Image (cartoon, rainbow, N blue to C red):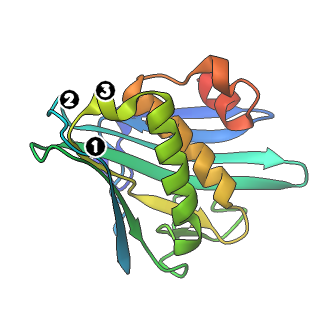
Amino acid sequence: MEGFLGNQVNMQQINSEYNGKARLWKESIPKLIYPTIDTIEQVLCTDLPKISGEKQVALEVMIPVGGRFLYGFLGAVFKPSASGQFLLQIPVSTDSEKIFADSIAADLDQIRFGLPNEYVQSVIDSAMFHLHKYQGIKILGSGTLCFEPAAHGELSSSKRFFGDIVAVLVQLLVLNRVDTDNNSDAPLGKLIITA
């Protein structure tokens, strides 16, 4: 069944008593529609062959940390092209988009659609680091990697947490799994690995 949050067959619900909740989509991701005020683009490499087909993955995560929690929702879509370049693309929203009422953290924070500018550099930095670490550009080849859709919490999101989400998304796109050797100490890595 295809709906607002994408194909439920491709969604994996992850619940952990102590480590939080997550929803993971592969192949068919949610279509969250919101306006963007800018799109940041960066060419990371040129002279690449077209190698892989289209890939997409999305992750929504809520993890308790002490007396508060961290939240983020981010998708990653890789579309191959014959351009010969690897293009990183991040659509930027305002921080006052519509409320995401179907979020797993909707009862705890005001969750809004979009990725505001304050998180963009963290997404870029994490994507570049993890694409290099896992040879993602070489594996994926020529095309565009767009980090969309997104949602953030007014109180529960952070730059670092969006960077952690990007790390998991890149691993899922490139390796089709989470690298247990390098994520076992991070709460997000532990949550996703146990799924």
Circles 1 and 2 in contact, beta carbons < 8 Å: yes
C-alpha distance separating marks 2 and 3: 8 Å
Quarter holding residue 82: top left
Residue in front for this viewpoint, 107 or 95: 95
In the image, taking residue 43 as reference, residue 182 lies left or right, namely: right
Residue in front for this viewpoint, 1 or 69: 69
Q: Is residue 42 above or below residue 194?
A: below
Across and down, in percent, residue 6 comes to 34, 47
Residue 78 got which mark? 1
Quarter holding residue 11: top left
Judging from the image, what secondary structure is the residue with disc 2 in?
loop
Which residue corresponds to mark 2?
52
Q: Residue at x 31, y 29 (%)?
A: 138
C-alpha distance separating marks 3 and 1: 12 Å
Disc 1 residue type? Phe
Q: Is residue 133 visible?
A: yes
Which residue corresponds to mark 3?
139
Quadrant into which the C terminus falls:
top right
The residue lying furthest to the front in this view is 47
Is disc 2 surrounded by few (<14), some (14 to 19) or many (20+) residues within 10 Å? some
Judging from the image, what secondary structure is the residue with disc 1 in?
strand
Judging from the image, what secondary structure is the residue with disc 3 in?
helix
Q: Nearer the viewer, mark 2 or mark 3?
A: 3
Across and down, in percent, residue 134 comes to 46, 27
Q: Residue at x 47, y 45 (%)?
A: 128
